[in-house]
Image (tube, rainbow, N blue to C red):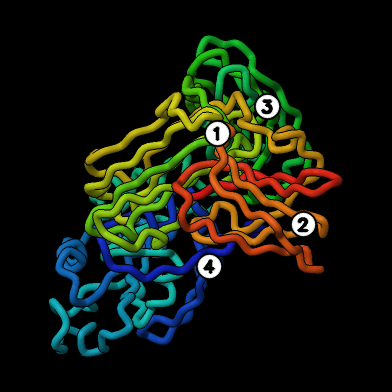
Amino acid sequence: MNRLKLILPFVFAFMLSTASHAQLPDGAAAPDWTATDIDGIEHNLYSYLDSGYAVILDFSATWCGPCWTYHTSGVLEELYESHGPNGTNEVRVFFIESDDSTTDEDLHGTGQNTWGDWTEGVNYPIIDNAGNIFSSYQNTYYPTLYTVCPNGLLNQIGQASYNIHVNYVESTDCAAASFPSDARILSYTGAIRSCPGEPAALSVRVMNNGTAPMTSCTFEATTLFGTELLSYEWSGNLDTYEIEDVQLGDAVFPTTSIFFIDIVSEDDNDSNNSISSTMNLSSQTSTSLVRVRLTTDDTPGDNSWSISDAAGAEVEGAPFGSMTEPNTEYTWWVSLPSTGCHAFDLYDLTGNGGDIACDLSTFNDDLQNINTIFTASNSGAWSNLNKGFLVNAINTDVAEFNGSSEPMLLHPNPANNSIVLNAVDASCHMIQIHHVSGALAKEWNGLSVPTSGSVNLDISDLASGIYIVSGHSAANKQSARLIVR
């Protein structure tokens, strides 16, 4: 039986903390591994999955108190006895000691860094020195317990009771493929935010949960009240447990609405053919000129922000670590390149929100604040705050400024100390920088442009804002928009 043809590369992380945002999410494909247990027997995860078993992985460390408490509760041993090889033969269980600094003595309870003998009374396999497996699952704390279903997808069940484990491994969500035709919608992966009148791209993650190849499928998206948003005929070739992200097309939502996506073609198992989500319409409007301000707290590297367009592509942003000074206000001026629906996202790395202040505002050509789209101040514990907005007007077009006829290239942009003008006309004799209101901010007369066509300008005395840089010659005028931050 073929496994997943495509498993996205995983970014390994080894950070022991209580933050869970780095963990592989429920429904992710479990990374395969091969390891030898302490009895010298080799095990391969996907071999067990291909044989139809659900596999429980207990990532622990010998020094971990909560790990010891759960380990000695006997839940996993009871599960292994009743549903393992000597029981119903549905489940495999692995204890995975994941701190490579611990010793074999620690594992057997005689070392200095242990709560006791982890091998006593345990009949399921124990794998030692498995930090590489721990990292491949992007685990961030001990214990972490996953159930990996025969389809290769994982779910973090955690330190659950015996009955919870049994109920999950025997549920239809974790059952091995048994119907010939069984298309399964795993998750909704499309847009969850749009703007009034703007199309939103809908998509789903689909698995062939049947034993026969899946070659066609019909999807239908409807509102809560049954109004059809779209219908899509998919065709392809997915073997058992193969997954594909299906782009269903665009839909326009009149209001914020719960909606459903269903498989409506013939299927042997309709219990996994539907999923719901909510489309949030953004009422905030904006020009193309926006300003982001963020005042850091004592841990400035914990925050980042981004502005993305309707397709989800980042237009501008500040990554984690780009703000380095504590209790300091940072300002960014962003000139968005197009109209349409956009989203602003603010992130906190550790998920505690922090004692920060942040706002996103929009301005007209006179640099007057005409709308504050987003504000956050001491908002409690959060890892992501977001707000959508519709850009419905582009600010000053530099091609129309003072009759400009030729573009001028400049970098960096945005800038704060100096800029380099490229492709400047050799006959240019004057360069001016104007506020967008038309007022002159700086001027250089009697220039002698080098043959390279590049001119360096000092702008360290300009305040934050948007400007128009223009080069004047006898033949024409060249202009470019400049953002100073």
Give me the C-alpha separation between circle 2 and circle 4. 57 Å
Q: Nearest to the eye among marks 2 and 3: give it.
A: 2
- Which residue sits furthest front? 446
Is any atom of residue 87 visible in this view?
A: no
Question: How far separated are the C-alphas under marks 3 and 4?
Answer: 36 Å
Judge by depth and name the residue closer to the eye, 56 or 391.
Answer: 391
Q: Which residue is mark 2?
A: 424
Disc on res. 342: 1
N-terminal-most mark, 2 or 4: 4
Residue 32, numbered circle? 4
In the displayed structure image, the side of residue 364 where residue 160 appears, left or right: left
Where residue 471 appears, as percent x and y from the top left, is 72, 49
Residue shown at the point (49%, 30%) measured from the top left: 363
Amino acid type, label 1: His
Question: Under tag 4, what secondary structure?
Answer: loop
Name the mark nearer the viewer: 3 or 4: 3
